[in-house]
Amino acid sequence: MLKRFFAETLLDLGELEGDYRVFYLKNDIAQTILSLTIAMISILGMLRVDAILFKDRPALFLGVIVYRGSFVLTTLLVMLAIRKTSKVRVYDRLVFAWIVLMVSFFVLFNFTRPASYPTTAYEIIIPFSIYVLSPLKIKYNVALALSFTAAMMFVDYFLKAGVDPMILNTTATAQLIVHTLGLGSALQIQSYRRKSFKAYILEKDAKEMVAYLANIDPLTKSLTRRHFFNIAETEFLRYSRYRRPLSILILDTDDFKTINDTYGHHAGDIVLRSFSLVALEQKRAQDTFGRLGGEEFGLLLPETNLEQAKIVADRIQKTWEQSPSNMDSEMIYSTVSIGGTETFYNDKSFEDVLRRADRLLYKAKGRGKNQVVME
C-alpha cells in the first residue's frame, strides 16, 4: 500500500534515476555539509547545558565532553569525505552512516539525562530534519526517523521511572504530527525536484532536437549546407595548424533534370534521398556528408590523403550505379560524377579547396559523367 502511494506521489524517472541523482549531487553535498556544520555547532553548544546538569559529577562531565568531542570529530571526518566524493553511491553511504551515528549518539546520550529533563526539542527537530534534509530515498528516511523516535520514547518512558502517562500521550501525539508533517514535506520536496529534473530533461531534449533539425536537410537527411561549411571551416583550420591530410569530394547526380522531366519532381526527391542514403552508408564514420544545394553534395574526409579519398569516391560511385531508386515499383537508374582534391600547402582558405574540387567535378561531367576525377 505504501509502495503504491509513493509510486503515485513521486514521479518515476525510470532509466533517468541515476542521472537525476548525479544532477543534484553537488547541491546535495553542499546542503549536507551545511547541515553537518550546524549539527556540530549545536552539539558543542550543548556543553553549557551539560555543565549545569553534571556540575556535581565532574568525572561524568569529562566523559560527556569526550563523548561529544568524538561525535564532532567523526562528523568532521564524514564531512571531509563527502566533500571529496563524486559518486552518488559513496555519498549515500556516508550520509546514511552519519544519520545512523547521530541517532545512536542521541539515544545513548539520553540514558545520562534525568527523567525530568526535557528532550522534546531534539525529539521533534531530528526526525523532521531527517525527512526534509536527507537526500536518501524516502523509505530509508522513514525508517531512520521512526527508529530514532521509537528508541527515544523507549528510553524516556519505559526505562526511566516517574513519567506521567498524560505526558506520554501528549508526546506520542506530537510525534505523530511531526512524522506526518515531515513525511509530507519530504514528499513535496522530492516530487518538486523530480518534476523539475524531468522538465529540464524535456527542455534539453527539445533544444537538441531543434538544433538537430536545423542542421539536417529534411529531404536527404544529410547535413545542411551551412552546417557542412561550419564543420569544413573547422577542419581546414585544424589542417592549417597541424598539417594533417584533409580531402574533399563534390558529388553531383548525373542527368537529374532529365529524371525530373521524365518521372516528375517526386521521383527526383526519391533519387536524391536514395543517393544520400547510399553515400551515408559508404562513407566512413569520421567523414562529414552534406547537401550543398540541388543535386550537389559534399563529402569531407579528415585525416585522408588523395589516394585514400579516391577509394571512398570509387566505392560510392560504383555502389550508386548499381542501386536503382524504387518509385511505385518502377526502378530509376542514376549515376554520379565526383570531383575530389586534397588540401595543398598554399591553400589560404577552405574556399580554395572547394573551388578546385568543383572544377574537377565539371571535368568529370565533361568526360562523359559517371566517373571520379581526383587531383
Image (spheres, rainbow, N blue to C red):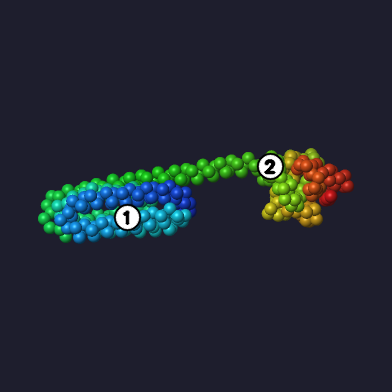
What is the CA distance from the residue labelled 2 to the residue labelled 1?
58 Å
Q: Would you name the residue on which mark 2 appears? A: 230
Q: Which of marks 2 and 1 is in front?
A: 1
Amino acid type at circle 1 is Val
On the image, the x and y values in percent for residue 207 come to: 56, 41
Name the N-terminal-most of marks 2 and 1: 1
Identify whether 67 is placed above or below 122: below
Tell me if I can see residue 7 in this picture: no
Which residue is labeled 1 in the image? Answer: 72
Q: How crowded is mark 1: few (under 14 residues within 10 Å), some or many (20 or more)?
A: many
Measuring 23% from the left and 58% from the top, which residue is drawn there? Answer: 62
Quarter containing the N terminus: bottom left
Type of amino acid at the residue the image marks with label 2: Asn
Depth order, front residue of 375/70: 70
Q: Residue at image x 28%, y 56%? A: 68
Residue for point 51% across, 42% down: 203
Location of residue 22 in the rendering, given as x and y in whole percent from the top left corner = 47, 51
Residue 366 placement, left or right of 277: right
The secondary structure type at the circle numbered 2 is helix
